[in-house]
Amino acid sequence: MHKFGVVSVSFRKHTAEEILEASQKAGLSYIEWGSDVHAPYDNLPNLERIAVLQEKYGIKCSSYGTYFKVGETPTELLEKYIDAAEILGTNILRLWCGNKNSEDYGENEKAQLFKECKKAAEIAAKRNAVLCMECHRFTYTNKREAALELMKEVNSDNFKMYWQPGEFRSIDENEQYAADIAEHTKIIHAFNWKGNMRYKLSEGADEWKRYMAYFPEDITLLLEFMPDDRIESLKEEADALKSFF
């Protein structure tokens, strides 16, 4: 059974409680907290307050959406991010791999990045955490070939992937990425973007059904950003996502 939730960065102007209340009304059961606004890793009282609020609204933390960039953020900070995730009730952390597209890495740079990834995976293994790289532009996992190379090289159950459709890729290209990376994917970010334009998720039903054919039935899908940025649109988007299955 699929698990449905939302990414808190969708509503940076709203409080954690407002987001949890809207999530509950939308019939969502999971949330990914962003480390930038709502859940900074070094604000322990705030993290503990969010954990209490989750209990109040019956929402579980699916993952911790960090802005930790492997190869750029000091690796010694990783344990503090894992500590924060544990307070929120999850062992899954979203990280970014590097700070530029895979094709812009030289061989020496790539070797150093992979070394840092392996180091991070070893730390995660000791802490029973799972580090998931987001397939995002301007990171090493911008292309499916690079993401697969990374997964093969690190080769760790504690180092996995997120998946999301690329707004500047074709549907066929996104489907191929989904097919190839599905076995390594823990969480999916769901939205319907075409280039710089945002559309309602319901308008992308056919392509999303194609994508989801490759993923297991118990995977977590998190709504990321509303087509109009309004928290009031969350229920409509949540209903659309659920209707795909």
Image (cartoon, rainbow, N blue to C red):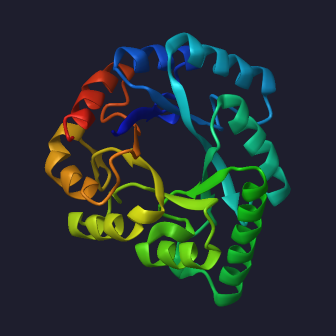
Where is residue 138? Give x, y as percent: 53, 65
Please state which of residues 194 and 237 is positioned toward the viewer in this rendering: 237
Judged left or right of residue 231, residue 54 is: right
Q: Quadrant of the C terminus?
A: top left
Q: Hey, which quadrant is residue 144 in on the image?
A: bottom left
From the viewer's perspective, is residue 63 above or below residue 142?
above
Which residue is the extreme one toward the bottom?
Answer: 107
Which residue is the extreme one toward the right?
Answer: 76
Where is residue 96? Give x, y as percent: 60, 58
Q: Name the residue rendered at 68%, 76% in the picture.
A: 114
From the viewer's perspective, is residue 111 above or below residue 202?
below
Where is residue 93? Give x, y as percent: 62, 47
From the viewer's perspective, is residue 11 above or below residue 220?
above
From the viewer's perspective, is residue 170 above or below residue 125?
below
Q: Quadrant of the N terminus?
A: top left
Q: Name the residue rendered at 35%, 60% in the picture.
A: 166
Q: Name the residue rendered at 35%, 53% in the picture.
A: 216
Where is residue 167? Give x, y as percent: 32, 57
Judged left or right of residue 194, residue 98 is: right
